[in-house]
Image (tube, rainbow, N blue to C red):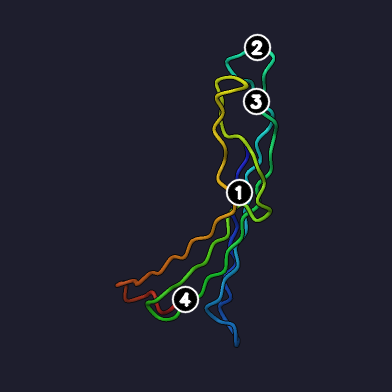
Amino acid sequence: MSDSWIKYSITRGPFKGFGLSGGYSLVSRRSTLEPGVSLASYFIANAGLQYRWQHFAIAVILNNITNKEYWTAAYNGINKWPGAPRSFMVNLNYSFDEGSDKR
């Protein structure tokens, strides 16, 4: 299993305060408790957009961009747990830190 996430924040110019992020999860083929039954490998891509202004921040994250169907775990070929479908979340943040407006 391999996961990674990277974020780039713009600190100058007309787009100051914006940020882009992206990440992925890569999982190889896995065995189950039943011999001969395995789960397929999968690759899931995620992305986000953030904006920070003074003490406020907002972020929108899109998970499983391609809406890939995948299995996270299984006991055998019948009892399997699916991974999450495409979803998004919004994060609103207020920081009481005096230095947060200098980021």
Q: Please identify the quadrant where the N terminus is shown.
A: top right
State the residue position of label 3: 30
Real-space Cα separation, disc 3 to disc 1, in angstroms? 20 Å
Contact? badges 4 and 2 (CB < 8 Å): no
State the image coordinates of residue 18 (x, y, percent, origin top left).
56, 76
Local secondary structure at mark 1: strand
State the residue position of label 1: 4
When asked about the image quadrant of residue 20, the answer is: bottom right
Assess disc 4: are there few (<14), some (14-19) or many (≥20) residues with their C-alpha within 10 Å of its C-alpha: many
State the residue position of label 4: 52
Sequence-wise first label, 1 or 4: 1
When asked about the image quadrant of residue 40, the answer is: top right
Real-space Cα separation, disc 4 to disc 2, in angstroms? 51 Å
- On residue 36, the disc is none
Give me the residue at 60% from left, 87% from top: 14
Above or below residue 100? Residue 2 is above
State the image coordinates of residue 2 (x, y, percent, origin top left).
63, 40
Local secondary structure at mark 4: strand
- On residue 35, the disc is 2
State the image coordinates of residue 56 (x, y, percent, origin top left).
39, 76
Sequence-wise first label, 1 or 2: 1
Q: Amino acid at mark 3?
A: Arg
**Of labels 3 and 1, the one closer to you:** 3
Local secondary structure at mark 2: loop
